[in-house]
Image (cartoon, grey):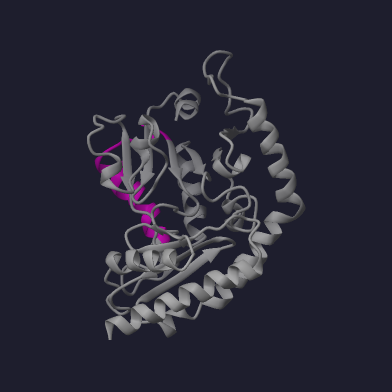
Amino acid sequence: MKLARYHTGREKFIAFTGAFHGRTMGALSLTGSKVVQRKGFGPLIPGVYHVPYPDTYRRPAGVTPEDHAVACVRFIEDELFRTLVPAEEVAAIIVEPIQGEGGYIIPHPTFFLELECLANKYEILLVFDEVQSGMGRTGKMWAADHFDAVPDILAVAKGIASGMPLSATIAREEIMDWGAGAHASTFGGNPVAVAASLATIELLEQELIANAADVGGHILDCIRDWPLRFPNVGDVRGLGLMIGIEIVHNQQSKDRAPELRNRLVSMAFERGLLILGAGRTAIRLCPPLVITRDQADFAIDTLEECLKQLTSSLE
């Protein structure tokens, strides 16, 4: 946010509903995932506007995924710029290429083409948050690579150093034009964390990105038919080892079922499998990139057992 403001001389930002960008004051202002994360911390940084993120599964009836993606971007120009904020005051559009906390939502590729066109038209920076989706998790170094999308600024952390505290802001030289002393961090460039990051990048390039693509593809091949086999599975989606499973009461109405999702998480834990919820009603599968096929098969078998038991209990 600081770099975007400094470079553009503008002060406002556009983020997306369902987004999670962090909990410090600036990042929290961009976050639109859960009200509990924002409650009691206002006023947050002003000038942040949230717009709809294209959820392919929950798109309006009769609308194609591509048209839904286009409509979400058109909303910015047709509604936001017309009623709330002048385009020339917007420094950046900040987006997760795949929404993490929002439910492991994968937008249609057209979304990024439209975003890039909009950003270029109004000279707005495009910022990708790849804290959760980057560093090989999706079977490519960056999730954006799946969509041939290139941001102006890239935010990276977590997987960059395999758990050691490190983050990075990556941008082209002409954008990162602030002078010495304009920005710094007490913990920036910690030598131990940097060493961990260099080792992590070497492992990713040698084998772990390929492993994420291979094992992630294997998991998806095994569970892709779950909506046909289990009435409470509405959708299965994912890239590499970033996989979401949508849990619903009814596949036709797509009624959200957070209580069933939470039951499945608990049932899996009791059987030795640790999984997490994502969004209002999805399960996320985001194992370490060193996972083997045998370990993945255990997870698949365990989840199948839980889903069978859940289905039986609801009959």
Please name the predominant secondary structure of the magenta segment in the image: helix
Instruction: Work out whether residue 115 or residue 241 is closer to the camera in this orientation and state it.
Output: 241
Q: Residue at x 66, y 29 (%)?
A: 192
**As drawn, which residue projects farthest toward the right?**
206
Q: Residue at x 39, y 68 (%)?
A: 267
Q: Quadrant of residue 59?
A: bottom left
Q: Quadrant of residue 22?
A: top left
Region rendered in magenta: 69-91
How many numbered marks are there? 0
Image side of residue 273 versus residue 41, left or right: right
Instruction: Work out whether residue 83 or residue 300 is closer to the camera in this orientation and state it.
Output: 300
Q: Is residue 275 above or below residue 50?
A: below
Q: Give the percent coordinates (x, y) of residue 64.
A: 41, 71
Q: Residue at x 48, y 36 (%)?
A: 123
Is residue 90 shown in magenta?
Answer: yes
Image side of residue 145 versus residue 236, left or right: right
Is residue 145 shown in magenta?
Answer: no
Quadrant, the C terminus: bottom left
Q: Residue at x 40, y 45 (%)?
A: 20
Q: Is residue 47 above or below residue 34?
A: above
